[in-house]
Amino acid sequence: MEQLIQQFFNVDLMIEAAPLLLQGLGTTLLLCLAVVPLGLAGGLGVALAGTSRMRWLRIATMVFVDFFRAIPPLVLLIFVYSGLPFAGVQLDPFSAVCIAFLLNNSAYYGEIFRAGIESIGGGQRLAARSTGLSAWQSMRYVVLPQATRNVLPDLMSNTVEVVKLTSLASVVSLQELLYSADMARSITYNASPIVLAALMYLALLWPMIRLVARFERRLGASAGI
Amino acid sequence: MSAWERFLDTFFNWAVITEYLPALGQGVLVTCQLAVAVVLTGLALGLGMALLRAYRFWAVNFVIVIFVDILRALPPLVLILILYFGLPNIGVTFSGFTVVWLVLSLVLAAFAEEIYWAGVLSVDQGQWLAARSTGLGFGQALIFVVLPQAMRMTIPPITNRTIAITKYTAIGMVVGVGEVLGQATTAQSFSGNASPLMAGALIYVALFLPLVVLSRWIEKRFAWRRA
Amino acid sequence: MAEESILSIEKLRLSYGELEVLKGVDFDLAKSELAFLIGPSGSGKSSLLRCCNRLEEPSAGRVIVDGEEVTAPGVNLNQLRRRIGMVFQSFNLYPHLTALGNVTLALRKVLKKSRVEADDIACSVLERVGLKDKAGSYPNALSGGQQQRVAIARALALEPAIMLFDEPTSALDPELVNDVLAVMRELRETGMTMLVVSHEMGFARSAADRVAFMEDGVIVEQGSAEQIFGDPNCDRTRAFVRQIAH
């Protein structure tokens, strides 16, 4: 037991590694600030294209979405980071992560937005058009606000997934939270720094998960006798 | 060499791909084994926890909720690194394969528990009343009446989550599991050519695209059928 | 009463926290009797039914069905429940099972009958409610009236000593009500003991031995259908009857 604490919950080592990890946490947050808005914007674009009236555009969007849902984000990331240089495209880790995750997250956020748009009945659009709003205006001011609210829990839980995915950036040597923790681990030969990183992820994401759960419970029911 | 030829030579070099094809094939085998093991363990464990939760023992449910929250909040790679590098220090050595299997199974179990439990909750209260009124016990009502309906409703989200977590098996490369991505990156650094990586990426698309298309179909088939 | 009592409810109380839903109900039902329970919504009619098989847990009082005390501690509730048939307002058929599957589930799992035996029983009961040809249909392929008749068959197959009906026709389109009432009438003719929460006055007049008016957690008065609907003793009963007559 003592050994377990020594190897996983060594407070001295944690304190020692904390500055490094906090620096990593800063990078992780910065990465989130880049990746989440990019993914949301990309997803919105994908959803609009996917619900377009042009058949070819819908099909092309579906192919795009399914392709990037089929390929593991890590594979995409490694391809962008260490495959593209062979074609003369040399990216720094941060840009590589942004590009790879933009592709991956657009597909996922896009599916959520699409489900939201499809959940709004045609009556809303008809009503909006009947008051003289253009197609784009009815989408922007009538359909999208309702659609977004309908899928807010899904958007939030996908955002949790996106934040978790940023840990993959450590694989391409981006010095975010997990990378810093693993560096500290390899210096100290002790897993405590990674446990500290885990605690930081928990502090970051647990409130969000609880919030999503509360959102979902509002739609839920009671069970069992 | 023209730009196009150079592109082909870099990403679709048949000589290189053929050379590493056996290794990539080996990787496919490992990826599939890992995926199947994770799916079986994770879903079974998740279902077991959801059923246990229906009995509403306060302490048990508390533990389940905490377990689920933690595994949902942590990036799987964090857990993998903790176990892979931490356990040997206390005298327990798991292979990379075992660690990835264990972590991804637990993560899938956490998500599956939550989805199944939401399914159980969403079954109409009248179903419980009817079942109990005919003399079925709590467990019988749960297994024969409520669970089948809950399972049906949860097929789309379970499918999507299972695919997402199965894809995550590519993380095995970080801890030396010779799955597709691991083989591909090794081959890339040996050959100094991006073709094995391209081949690896295409293999993943070939493995998972059918599943993604299937999930799309399942979503259409099951999503709007609520009696 | 000389006749054997099938259901007897004594000083039954039910509370949800502060709220008292049943405030000491006494009620008896003799063998082969058909009683109607009427009253405004929220008066506790459905709760009273659910206390009879302890789908709701009464806070005080006793319920005795066919000589066995339902409210006794340690009673084999599941074996007792199958002797108390219950039919719900919203049918509550199992959507994932066929009509036959709905009827056979408890036969097989509670009475431990073999599949063949259960199927036999179910077929004959479905025939009795006029739905033999629908045995293989899923609930969503049946009309409301047909679903409710399957629900009656589901309860009937377990050979109950008494049947409880909780507003069995109020979720039905008007043209489907008669199918269900015909089945209930047939049950009555074969001597089934029945307690019915319903406002089908026509049916009550022609079939009920007794009508009880319930309000605010107590039974206010009871008597023959003629008397309760035509000349009730109590003003509250009169006011309520006038309301539902329209």
Image: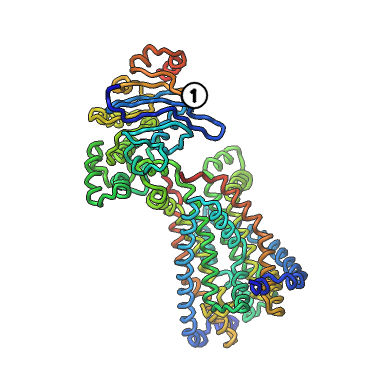
Nearest to the observer: residue C89 or residue B10: C89
Identify the element where label 1 is drawn: loop
- Please name the residue that numbered disc 1 is placed on: C216
Q: In which quarter of the image is residue A3?
A: bottom right
| Residue located 55% across and 57% down the image | B64
Task: In the displayed orientation, state which residue is furthest to the front.
Answer: C73
The quadrant the C terminus of chain C occupies is top left
Up the image or down, B152 lies above or below C22; here it is: below
Chain assignment, label 1 = C
User: Residue B81 location in percent, x, y?
Assistant: 62, 73
Is A67 on the left or on the right of C124, as rendered? right
Up the image or down, C244 lies above or below A113; here it is: above
Up the image or down, C185 lies above or below A121; here it is: above
Q: What residue type is labelled 1?
A: Asp
Nearest to the observer: residue C217 or residue B119: C217
Q: Quadrant of residue C156?
A: top left
| Residue located 43% across and 16% down the image | C237
Label 1: few (<14), some or many (≥20) within 10 Å?
Answer: some
Up the image or down, C163 lies above or below B25; here it is: above
